[in-house]
Amino acid sequence: MWKIRHEGSPQYAETTLEAIHQELADGMWEATDEVMGPGETEWTAIENHPQLEELAMDLEPPPAPHYDDETRLDMTALIDVCLVLLVFFILTTTVAALQVRLEAPSLEDSKISVKSVTVKEAEQSMILCRASQAGGQLVIKVEQDTVEPADLTRVFKRYARDTGKTTLLLDHDDEVPHDVVVKIIDAAKGAGLDRVQLLVQPAK
């Protein structure tokens, strides 16, 4: 019968050689623990015993204990914040680059040069369209005809065909919604007119 104990321990267990082999493989004993075989009178370290030293050499040393380092800085949260800021700056830069500044025509020389035409020249070469708000209702007139927004393209085509004019002169009040102005311009383009000009009233 074999005896086995932890290194330097006064207590031991009796077992068989096959059981010691299995327990070593299972990690229950370390190579420095001691055994005493049948007929032996002294304890011998497992790694030094002739019948166990080969098996002890195959054993992997136990992993070193791991202690959490309280001084270690967790970078995960910092990386997340940096990614959010990076996406924010990319989107902000993209939107700023796509912004288009729209300015109304002006007669101020410092901003834009406006070509002046007389009423007679406008009547001869342009189709006049007026848009205004009367009593809270939108009124659109092409020359002297009051036109519904849905009929603008058809009316523009008729005037272009009958008069040969290919330029639209648009006069609208400040109260007219911007989307209405856009619809009038789109209708003129759909009717095949070459140009759309806005009527600018001189500053008083």
Image (cartoon, rainbow, N blue to C red):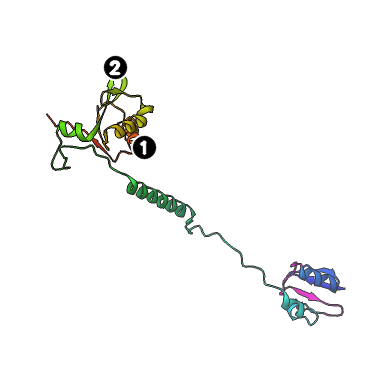
Q: Report which residue position mark 1 lands on.
A: 190
Q: Amino acid at mark 2?
A: Gly
| Circle 2 SS class | loop
**Which quadrant is the N terminus positioned in?**
bottom right
Outermost residue, front side: 162
- Lower sequence index among marks 2 and 1: 2
Residue 162: where, in percent of width, then height?
A: 29, 32
Residue mark closest to the camera, 2 vs 1:
1
Region rendered in magenta: 26-40
Q: Report which residue position mark 2 lands on.
A: 135
Q: Residues within 10 Å of mark 1 (few under 14, many from 20)?
A: some
Q: Residue at x 52, y 60 (%)?
A: 69
Disc 2 from disc 1: Cα separation:
30 Å
Magenta stretch contains residue 27: yes
Residue 170: where, in percent of width, then height?
A: 25, 32
Q: Nearer the viewer, residue 60 or 185?
A: 185
Magenta stretch contains residue 13: no
Q: Amino acid at mark 1?
A: Gly
Q: Residue at x 23, y 34 (%)?
A: 126
Horizontal side, residue 27 vs residue 112: left or right: right
